[in-house]
Image (cartoon, helix red, strand yellow):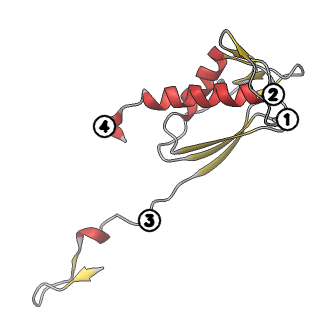
Amino acid sequence: MTTRTGYGRPRLVAEATGRGPAVHIRYRVRLHVDKYGIVQPRPAGHPDGLLPRYQRGAVVEVHTGNGSCIAGYNAAIIAESFKNCSAVYLISDVAEGHAPVMELGTAYNAEGVLRLLSAAIERAAASRDTAAC
């Protein structure tokens, strides 16, 4: 969008200078689940280390697979990767809508895993710098 200023060149209007539609990147992440159903950030010997931090405004789908147990400290580690995202969707293969079973910061069923991850991501997102949002 431009506007004419006399006989000179067209001048860009402030609305058109780098302010196009917001573009959001969508990622799909599959968390590591061991043979016992315990959700972990990644295996200890993984060459990439922990999960990467995602860019501000990214949309992430986190798939917990058949995970049915997660410790609170693992949920906090996973949540740090997603704290800058604009939306995080938690997906489970085995969640059936039962009441979450949680005790002493550890979740013991699929619904509890989703609830604990959701709470951890909310806490991590609340701790980010609000001036940068």
Q: Which residue is mark 3?
A: 21
Disc 1/disc 2 C-alpha distance (Å): 8 Å
Measuring 57% from the left and 25% from the top, which residue is drawn there?
A: 120
Q: How far across and how far down the image is residue 57, in percent?
A: 49, 47
In the rendered image of this protein, does residue 44 appear above or below residue 53?
above
Q: Which element carries disc 2, helix, strand or loop?
A: loop
Question: Given this view, does label 4 or label 1 mark the residue nearer the observer?
Answer: 1
Q: Which element carries disc 3, helix, strand or loop?
A: loop
Q: Which residue is mark 4?
A: 131
**Label 1–label 2 contact, CB within 8 A:** yes
Whichever of labels 2 and 3 marks the residue nearer the N terminus, that label is 3
Disc 3 residue type?
Pro
Disc 2 residue type?
Gly
Disc 4/disc 2 C-alpha distance (Å): 36 Å
Q: Which element carries disc 4, helix, strand or loop?
A: helix
* Residue density around tag 4, few if under 14, some if 14–19, many if 20 or more, within 10 Å: few
Q: Which residue is mark 1?
A: 94
The quadrant the N terminus occupies is: bottom left
* Residue density around tag 1, few if under 14, some if 14–19, many if 20 or more, within 10 Å: some
Q: How far across and how far down the image is residue 121, in percent?
A: 56, 30
Residue situated furthest top in the rendering: 104
In the rendered image of this protein, does residue 24 appear above or below residue 72?
below
